[in-house]
């Protein structure tokens, strides 16, 4: 195989083939069938939970749950219950990672079942069946492109002969596993369900045994706090630790958050100031989340105005969503009229991450907000009246009154299943951000749709078939996400009215070509598009060459590798030869973004592919690019 690939590379040189033609040949040799690339789901997807060694309360709950899992037949469903912040999710993450679990189950499936918001702190509903099905489909590497009403049967077929462990985090109401797609006879194969909940009496029919998670005692709290400080090499006097643990109410989650914040401080006066802030937060109000807000709210005390705004903006995304950093930064830059460079906002986001207000993934491509921080942000935003955010469940009656939208700057209806009451001529004269992503049942905008102040519109994954002509009123629009709108087959002329638009994402749409109207988007800086749309566009180089301020094109080829037309790269690079600074990137399998070509201050250079599909492909294509450029090749 290796000799065949090497021969292909060098025969490409001798024949004068360009880099993309030879690259396609290499890919074809290594992966003649795209099905070979799609892996079976991993048995376990590992978490990185906090260390619980020496925390007897959590260790006991974990060991008790493991002992129930060993009961092959008598125990099918295990409930882990306790107050908010006691560490139930931490226990589940350790359970997920445990060697015993990997040895006894074919696959472990983790599902986040519900979300917490200021109005959902009491017992409420779970996420929709469709959302849970999508999460299972993603976990099992199944095709999300099939009709939604087929998800159940696709899941059922994939798990028919599988012994699985289903871990359900934050259950608020009984679930119908059959409706999601889990086979009716799942228990006959030894499959089991473990779920966490704050409500002991929830889903009694699934509860064969129950494990309660209590509060830490003072000794355990001090140990946990000290362990976090030791990793940072920052010793703090025990008297401060004792005060902090007591103010945290002996809650695992709160102790982790506060200790992570304290570990940066070495000045005793600053530590005392933080403790004082911890005692007095919040300054007004008396709700069910006051204790939680008091515990973690002090972390936001010293944020600048723009840092606090970005933190609040992150709460618009669904609970514990993986938020693409580029998306968050683009939206927040739009809220600030792109007055600062992306580097400025990246630095600010890193500052928030360093303070643990956001958590970064291992690949540093995504961030997400801990549910308690999101809860705090929503609580504060509602008190300020700056936002109307609808939780991802059945909406409450007072939120269906569109009159309360007037004066709101940000509205998030992400993953909401009850959109129609909201979109009947809402009055939103100040609205700048509208999130509708993830609503597969959302098909139509109200007519007319007149929100002149709109800057960010996220329609990702909706079922819209067209954009209303009245959207032309939104002339201040700066960021538009239409990705995964599979029923959107064309874009109307209204697109050319967005003269200020700087970011446009049409990846995964039903578009067969790049709309000609895009040439009118003279301010466009970042364009994300499927390779099929570029391939289907006649004279694509002429279209792109009109976008004189374009800085980046990202071509999504991850679903089209088998038929990918590598000459696209040549077409695109021809169109941007006169651009001062430009970057061409591609999105391949496994969500890998690869820099292909870059122009900076008139200097052009290639980058080697770093596909994570196959190590041979990594190494050989890298060498091939180096040899090709050294030989004088390239655009």
Image: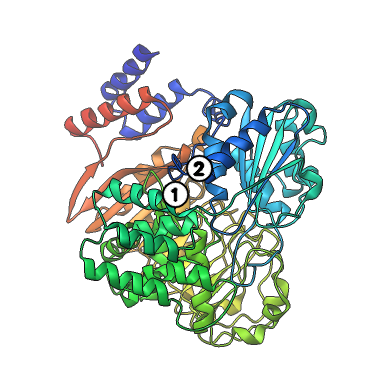
Closer-to-camera residue (109/401): 109
Query: Is the C-beta separation of discs 1 and 2 under 8 Å?
Result: yes
Residue 29, position in %: x, y?
Answer: 44, 20
Res. 543 visible in picture: no
The residue under label 2 is 56
**Residue shown at 54% from the left, 57% from the top:** 85
Residue 429, position in %: x, y?
Answer: 54, 87
Q: Quadrant of the C terminus?
A: top left
* Side of 85 relative to 352 (left or right): right
Closer-to-camera residue (541/357): 357
Crowdedness near tag 2: few (<14), some (14–19) or many (≥20) residues, C-alpha within 10 Å: few
The CA distance from mark 1 to mark 2 is 7 Å
Q: Quadrant of the N terminus?
A: top left
* Side of 125 relative to 474 (left or right): right
**Residue shown at 39% from the left, 69% from the top:** 310
Q: Quadrant of residue 41?
A: top right
- Res 220 label: 1
Crowdedness near tag 1: few (<14), some (14–19) or many (≥20) residues, C-alpha within 10 Å: many
Residue 82, position in %: x, y?
Answer: 62, 54
Q: Secondary structure at mark 1?
A: helix
């Amino acid at each position: 195989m290796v000799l065949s690939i090497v021969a292909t590379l060098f025969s490409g040189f001798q024949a004068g083939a360009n880099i993309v033609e030879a690259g396609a040949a290499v890919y074809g040799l290594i992966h003649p069938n795209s099905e070979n690339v799609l892996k079976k789901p991993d048995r376990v997807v590992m978490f990185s939970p906090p260390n619980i060694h020496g925390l007897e309360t959590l260790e006991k709950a974990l060991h008790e749950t493991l002992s129930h899992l060993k009961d092959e037949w008598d125990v099918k469903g295990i409930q882990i219950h306790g107050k908010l912040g006691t560490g139930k999710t931490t226990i589940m993450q350790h359970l997920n990672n445990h060697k015993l679990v990997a040895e006894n189950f074919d696959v472990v499936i983790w599902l986040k079942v519900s979300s917490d918001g200021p109005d959902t702190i009491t017992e409420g509903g779970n996420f929709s069946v469709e959302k849970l099905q999508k999460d299972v489909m993603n976990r099992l590497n199944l095709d999300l492109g099939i009709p939604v009403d087929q998800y159940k049967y696709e899941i059922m077929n994939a798990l028919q002969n599988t012994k699985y462990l289903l871990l359900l985090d934050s259950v608020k109401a009984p679930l119908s596993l059959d409706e999601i797609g889990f086979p009716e006879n799942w228990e006959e194969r030894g499959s089991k369900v473990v779920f966490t909940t704050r409500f002991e009496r929830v889903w009694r029919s699934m509860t064969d045994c129950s494990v309660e998670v209590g509060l830490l005692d003072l000794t355990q709290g001090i140990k946990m706090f000290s362990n976090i400080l030791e990793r940072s090499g920052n010793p703090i006097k025990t008297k401060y630790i004792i005060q902090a643990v007591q103010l945290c109410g002996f809650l695992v989650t709160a102790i982790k958050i506060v200790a992570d914040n304290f570990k940066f401080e070495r000045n005793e006066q600053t530590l005392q100031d933080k403790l004082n802030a911890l005692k007095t937060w919040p300054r007004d109000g008396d709700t069910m989340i006051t204790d939680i807000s008091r515990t973690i709210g002090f972390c936001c005390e010293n944020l600048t105005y723009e840092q606090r705004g970005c933190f609040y903006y992150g709460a618009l995304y669904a609970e514990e969503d993986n938020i693409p950093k580029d998306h968050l930064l683009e939206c927040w830059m739009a809220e600030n009229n792109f007055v600062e460079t992306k580097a400025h906002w990246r630095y600010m986001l890193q500052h928030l991450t360093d303070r643990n207000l956001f958590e970064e993934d291992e690949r540093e491509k995504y961030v997400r907000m801990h549910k308690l921080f999101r809860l705090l942000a929503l609580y504060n935003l509602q008190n300020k009246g700056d936002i109307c955010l609808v939780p991802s469940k059945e909406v409450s009656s007072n939120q269906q009154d569109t009159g309360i939208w007037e004066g709101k700057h940000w509205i998030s209806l992400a993953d909401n299943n009850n959109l129609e009451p909201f979109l009947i001529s809402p009055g939103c004269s100040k609205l700048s951000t509208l999130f509708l992503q993830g609503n597969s049942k959302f098909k139509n905008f109200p007519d007319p749709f007149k929100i002149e102040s709109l800057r960010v519109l996220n329609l990702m994954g909706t079922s819209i078939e067209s954009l209303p002509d009245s959207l032309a009123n939104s002339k201040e629009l700066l960021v538009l996400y239409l990705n995964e709108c599979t029923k959107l087959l064309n874009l109307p002329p209204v697109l050319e009215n967005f003269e200020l638009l700087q970011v446009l994402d049409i990846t995964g749409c039903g578009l067969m070509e790049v709309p000609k109207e895009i040439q009118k988007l003279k301010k466009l800086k970042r364009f994300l598009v499927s390779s099929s749309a570029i391939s289907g566009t006649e004279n694509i180089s002429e279209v792109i060459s009109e976008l004189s301020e374009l800085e980046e094109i990202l071509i999504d080829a991850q679903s089209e590798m088998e038929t990918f037309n590598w000459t696209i790269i040549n077409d695109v690079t021809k169109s941007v030869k006169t651009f001062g600074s430009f970057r061409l990137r591609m999105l391949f399998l496994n969500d890998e973004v690869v820099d292909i070509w870059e122009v900076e201050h008139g200097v052009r250079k290639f980058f080697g592919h770093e596909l994570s599909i196959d190590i041979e492909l990594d190494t050989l294509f890298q060498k091939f690019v180096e040899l090709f450029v050294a030989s004088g090749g390239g655009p």
